[in-house]
Amino acid sequence: MSKQTKALLFNFIGFAIIFFPARYLFAEYANFKSWQIPLAAFIVATLLSPKFKAIRTSEGEKLFMSWMFTKGVKEIKK
C-alpha cells in the first residue's frame, strides 16, 4: 500500500472516530434540528481530527501527521 493511500485511509479513520460519537452526542443532548446534527458533527470532526499527508523527500516518500493536540509535525514510521 502506498503512503498516499495510507494517508487517505488514516484521514478517513481519524475523521470517522470523531464524527460518529459527535453526531450521537449532538443528537442526544443538543436541541438541533435534523440537518443541523450532521453539520455540527462534521464541523467538530473536521477541526479535531488529525491530518495525515504523504510527502516525497530525498530519502523517499514519508508519512507525516499534524494534530492540534500535539506539538509540531510528527513522522509516522510504518
Image: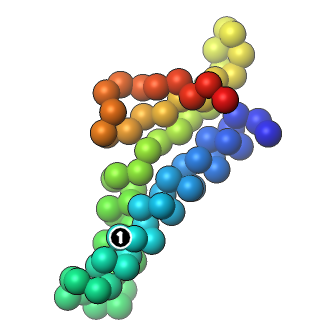
- Residue 17 in picture, x, y percent from top left: 48, 61
Secondary element type, mark 1: helix
Could you tell me how many numbered marks the image carries? 1
Instruction: Please name the residue shown 46% across and 25% down the image.
Output: 74
Whether residue 36 is visible? no
Amino acid at the residue labelled 1: Ala
Instruction: Please name the residue shown 31% across and 27% down the image.
Output: 71
What residue does disc 1 label? Answer: 22
Furthest-right residue in view?
1
- Residue 10 in picture, x, y percent from top left: 59, 47
Quadrant of res 63 = top right
Quadrant of res 1 = top right
Q: Tell me if 16 is positioned left or right of 41 in this view.
A: right
Quadrant of res 29 = bottom left
Q: Tell me if 28 is positioned left or right of 1 in this view.
A: left
The residue closer to the viewer here, 32 or 71, is 71
